[in-house]
Image (spheres, rainbow, N blue to C red):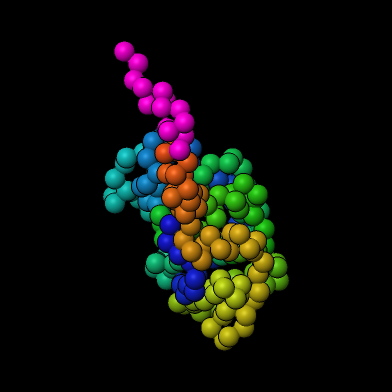
Amino acid sequence: MDKFTVYQGLVAPLNRENVDTDAIIPKQFLKSIKKTGFGQNLFDEWRYLDHGEPGQDCSNRPINPDFILNQARYQGAGILLARKNFGCGSSREHAPWALAQFGFRAIIAPSFADIFFNNCFKNGLLPIVLSELQVDHLFNETLAFTGYQLTIDLARQEVITPNNTAYSFDIAPFRKHCLLNGLDDIGLTLQHADKIKAFEAERILKMPWLTTQLP
């Protein structure tokens, strides 16, 4: 998992409340047994005018020109600005996978669904809770200025606007540590690799029959 320290990126405003995980990545794409390739189908039913299926070539699909992520000014956005209760609905981890694989590093909203919120941290995606008033201000700024960018300083826990206004946000110390150091659950486990190997070696010495193969 990539480290998240200071990130500056283009902002894309998704002005909808209660965006659920089936909208983020529709259910038919959950058939895949891989953990990759979901970015092209992020918000599939909103981005395209036809019905998408897993494995489909998206390069020739009809694009919905009215959807925000299809507009030229938001191409390459790395920060998604959203409304309250983002990520509600089912608990599918594919939703943060799709957002991250599309290129987003952070999501800013007044509130998130709990399971989605937790899944973001496990996949290197930073969900930031700001007040509705602050989010309103950011929506106004993003819509008013083409190329609007924000800087997110995780160590200082601040979202910084182009005019140097800083909005503070809360984050649990453990989650902050993991993001700053690029540690997912596997990475955290591997930090104890020497102890795990020592335990396994000692267990084999005490219980050698565990390595015996059955005839």
Can residue 41 be seen?
no
Q: Quadrant of the N terminus?
A: bottom left
- 52 lies above or below 59: above
Magenta segment: does it hold 211? yes
Q: Position of residue 8 (x, y in %)?
A: 47, 75
Q: Position of residue 120 (x, y in %)?
A: 54, 54
Q: Position of residue 67 (x, y in %)?
A: 47, 58
Count of number-bearing discs:
0
- Range of residues picked out in magenta: 202-215
Q: Is residue 111 left or right of residue 65?
A: right
Magenta span: predominant SS is: helix
Residue drawn at point x = 45 percent, y = 64 percent: 3
Magenta segment: does it hold 8? no
Can residue 38 be seen?
yes
Residue drawn at point x = 41 percent, y = 27 percent: 208
Q: Position of residue 84 (x, y in %)?
A: 66, 58
Q: Is residue 193 left or right of residue 61?
A: right
Residue drawn at point x = 37 percent, y = 51 percent: 40
Residue closest to the eye, 166 or 194? 194
Q: Quadrant of the C terminus?
A: top left
Residue closest to the eye, 124 or 145? 124
Residue closest to the eye, 146 or 38? 38
